[in-house]
Image (cartoon, rainbow, N blue to C red):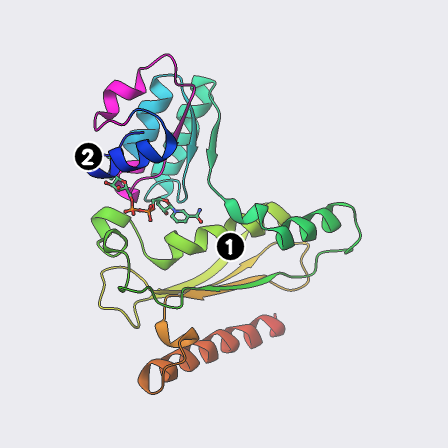
Amino acid sequence: MVDIDEQRAEELASLCACPGSIDVADAMVLDAIDIVIVSTINASIHPLVMEALRNKKHVLCEKPLGCNAAQAKAMVAAAESSGCVLKTGFNHRHHPAIKQAKALFDEGKIGELHFMRARYGHGGRHKGMRKNGVARELSGGGELLDQGVHILDLFRWFAGNFKEVFAQTSTNYWNIQVEDNAFAILKKDYLKLAPIFDFNDIKGVFADQAGWEVEQGIRHLKDGWDICSHVKML
Ligand SMILES: NC(=O)c1ccc[n+]([C@@H]2O[C@H](COP(=O)([O-])OP(=O)(O)OC[C@H]3O[C@@H](n4cnc5c(N)ncnc54)[C@H](O)[C@@H]3O)[C@@H](O)[C@H]2O)c1
């Protein structure tokens, strides 16, 4: 168990009954380690995954797979040439309802796929946004990268790759460097209607608080519906 924060390393190591360390490089070369789980802030994902692959370790990397597409592609290429397995922590695939929907779809019981729609949002976090999630140099992005990747993964899991994407990101609510809203329409040939997802990090959407926050939420929900009616016209 390695963390650059010694106290956190020790605490988690004692919970897992394993040795704790602050030295990543030392741990990465240990023969006893076959698989490395990378679950750090986004900025350190790419260097840590690359180091693990260089040392011929299989890797489970928490989402997102790096800060941007270039980093993700580099990690996939490194995994392919190392012969090691690289997986991303898309745990939503294992949610019982989604698992069952996928099984029914694969068995042909749902029938032809016409469209998919998803909305994903955080109801605000107790102490506001995660500190590491709002500075672009640490996170690489905001809500799209943090939560949107789950939706993109699920859509691609069901439907494969998409050909066209119409998307918009914006920072509407939090005073942060990255987006707290993202809306997207993804399109592929055989779908009669374009899939859509939208998600946000607006406290007011879910909070039972009166006033401005709730109105913000409603406004964004309306934005979402505006986009939906556009999809129906396609
Ligand atoms: N799949 C999911 O549903 C899900 C849910 C929550 C978080 N996550 C992902 O898990 C990761 C961690 O999230 P979190 O909320 O636990 O973050 P966190 O900030 O609470 O913890 C990150 C830890 O990484 C340590 N760290 C930072 N840089 C490091 C480095 N170079 N080497 C070793 N340790 C380092 C920090 O000291 C900290 O203890 C993120 O990638 C996040 O997106 C995934």
- The reply to whether the residue tagged 2 has its Cβ within 8 angstroms of ligand 1 is no
Q: Is 167 left or right of 105, judged from the image as shown?
A: left
Residue occupying image coordinates x 24% and y 26%: 21
Residue 34 belongs to the span the image colors magenta: yes
Residue at 36% x, 86% y is: 210
**Cβ of mark 1 under 8 A from ligand 1:** no
Would you say residue 5 is visible in this rendering?
no
**Picture quadrant where residue 74 is located:** top left
110 in relation to 170, above or below = above
Q: Quadrant of the C terminus?
A: bottom right
Residue at (26%, 64%) from the top-left corner?
127
Q: Is residue 216 visible to us here?
A: yes
Label 2 neighbour load within 10 Å: few <14, some 14-19, many 20+: few
Mark 2 = which residue? 6
Check the picture and name the quadrant holding the N terminus: top left
Q: Vertical placement of 58 versus 37: above or below?
A: above
Query: Residue 66 appears at what percent x and percent y?
Result: 35, 40
Percent position (x, y) of residue 30? 33, 15
Q: Amino acid at mark 2?
A: Glu
- As helix, strand or loop, the secondary structure at mark 1 comes to helix
Q: Name the one closer to the observer, 103 or 117.
A: 103
Q: Does the magenta portion include 25? A: yes
Query: Which of pointers 2 and 1 lies earlier in the amino acid sequence?
Result: 2
Residue type at numbered disc 1:
Ile
Tell me, for residue 109, which label it has, or none.
none
Q: Which residues are magenta?
A: 20-45
Find numbered disc 2 in the image and state the secondary structure of the residue it sits on. Answer: helix
Labels in figure, total: 2
- Note whether 1 is above or below 101 in the view shown: above
At a point 78% along the width and 46% down the height, the residue shown is: 107
Image disc number at residue 151: 1
**How far is the residue under mark 2 from the one under mark 1?**
34 Å
